[in-house]
Image (cartoon, rainbow, N blue to C red):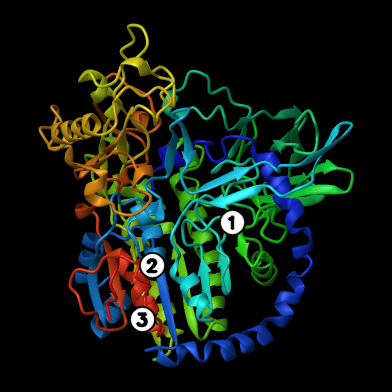
Amino acid sequence: MCAGIIELPLAYIGPGAGIALVGSFLAVLTALASAGALMVSWPLRRLWRTIRGQRALRQAHVDRVVILGLDGLEPSLTEAYLDQGLLPNLARLRDQGTYRRLGTTWPPLSPVAWSSFSTGTNPGKHNIFDFISRCPATYRPEVSSVRIGAPRRILRLGKYVLPLSRANISLLRKSKPFWAVLSESRVFSAILRVPITFPPDRFDGVQLAAMCVPDLLGTQGTFFHYTDEDRHGESPDHDDAEHRIPVERQGTRIRSFVRGPANPLRAEQCELRLPFTVEPAHGRVAAVMRIDGERVELDWNRFTDWVRVSFALAPGIRMHGLCKFLLKRFGERFEMYSTPVQIDPDRPLMPIAQPTVFSSYLARSQGPFATLGLAEDTGALSEKVLSEDAFLAQAYGIHEERKAMFFDALERVRRGAVVCVFDGPDRIQHMFWRFLEDTHPALRGTANTHRDTIRDMYRRMDTLVGQTMDKLDEKTALLVMSDHGFNAFRRGVDLNAWLLENGYLALRGAATTSRRSYLAEVDWSRTRAYAMGLAGMFINEQGREAQGIVAPGAAKQQLVAELAGRLTGLCDPQTGEVAIREAVPREKVYSGPYVEAAPDLIVGYNRGYRVSWDSAVGKTSESVFSDNTKPWSGDHCVHPDLVPGVLFASLKLETNSPRITDIAPTTLTLLGIEPPAYMDGQSLV
């Protein structure tokens, strides 16, 4: 996944996060009361499911299909570590069953690939083409997979505003996931943290949502940095001003606050704040925090447990979240990090689980856990607020939370499907790939202190596979897979700069660069094409874009073909390497009812290259090519032929070239259900 998009607070452009949060909050109040009943009744529910599913499973080849997703596992590294004997459990799975490289999607981005995994279809049928899409009426970015709208009816009572209807939270992924098809035949599924499941699907089973679940601010992850150090004048690459919160010293005591959203129940929409104090401690801990009636012990450079926080909205009404703190310095200078304030799974303000009380069940049986869609804080590591070691501690803490949920599902769901995606491999490779290459621009001038981090991560994932295999019986089929692979991100390609340089895009006045995001300085009256997002280009088409100038039909198709021809094989003059392996019209790689929502041109980069940070958010920099010096140093936003995923199976497969769209029909076939005709994939058994 690509942090340039995810780190931005783009999640819910429109009515504001607070309104949507409270609308959902009022909708789930009554459901939360039944969390205890869910835990008590689980054995009876399990028995009832077994009875209902008996008929459907009579035609099944197995009682259960377990899919363990390891996001971003790279075939070349996997195969090298297998040859070195470092992955004994994956080797055992390969030897008793099958190992293949797994074909991925155009583009090979997690929201796109996992949507094809779940639906068995190409993106033209499921409508997810990138992390973000653009609104043709405004040229502004929108999160591609979800829309949140304000309640339609409100009641104003003096200084208070009360919603009288629910917020509208809509999943934009189309088609039907295979667990919904299973549900129609009364086959139960447990679906844990599969990307693009927010808001959760409604089906016979349990589900915990993943990618695009927001924090309490309504963003995709806004961390907080508490410091009394003046960082003015630092490089813009390390400017965390939007995350910095001031602290006040009163003798040896520090006072500050946790930021909440704007209060959605107040007409003036004032920002909610939760105060806290930090004081030095003596003995085994460094300091003590007092927050929301709790005493929290702080130790040097170690994360606290999850701290529950709440914000007062109105008399008797509070908004609940949770976060972790990490104390970095407390002496002459004070410095502390806080994770984004995440939705409390025991008292969720938005629907993050199916049924709603499932997240409460997990929280009460296993303890609080991260709910943010992308909880590993790559942004804080990029801004040097978190160290590499702290980031790894965070990532592996989330990994352990996920493992507890997964093993609980394996214990309780004996017939049907169990799917769980672990995203640590993706996040760790994004941030630590630079340590695999001594000449990577992001490593320039620094020591290679984490040369073995990625190797160690693969070994940890192999241990997870072994623990999973030990819990399964001969009536269970196990698939271990990744949605795409990985490679280096050394150089960025600014597509908007290329369009400007070649006369397809124009800026206002005599400007030669645009440092403002989201195409803010583009002269649309002279612009024929523009780029936004990670994967493609759009034509400024008449009748579609608000200020379109290119006629639809033959003129547009001619322009698309011209751009594809000029971009395919584009060389980097500094290195002499081909930067763009292939640029293709969308109709060449997509089919289905939603093709019109895709970018007009899809760009497949070569190894070592990716869309530049500026181009991804609609800026235009001085040069087309630039070094990537950020810690985010590995990526998969390239030509799909270069980054296939991996597929290990406990049974023999019938093809040497499986694709990610084949997993859904394979799962259905194994469980005795005919795959629907709309699926593009084929069963592998």
User: Residue at label 1?
Assistant: 370
**Location of residue 435 in the rendering, given as x and y in whole percent from the top left corner:** 30, 47
Judged from this view, the residue extending furthest toward the left is 576
Give the residue at mark 3. Answer: 669
Which residue is disc 2 drawn over? 461
Q: Secondary structure at mark 3?
A: helix
Q: Give the secondary structure at mark 2.
A: helix
User: Looking at this rendering, what residue extends furthest in the top direction?
Assistant: 510
**Residue at horizontal 39 percent and vertical 48 percent from the top:** 1
Q: How many marks?
A: 3
Residue 301 location (% of width, % of height):
56, 47
Spatial CA span between label 2 and label 3: 28 Å
- Whole-percent x and y of residue 246? 67, 28
Where 535 sits versus 73, above or below?
above
Decide if residue 87 is in sight here: no
52 relative position to 296: left or right: left
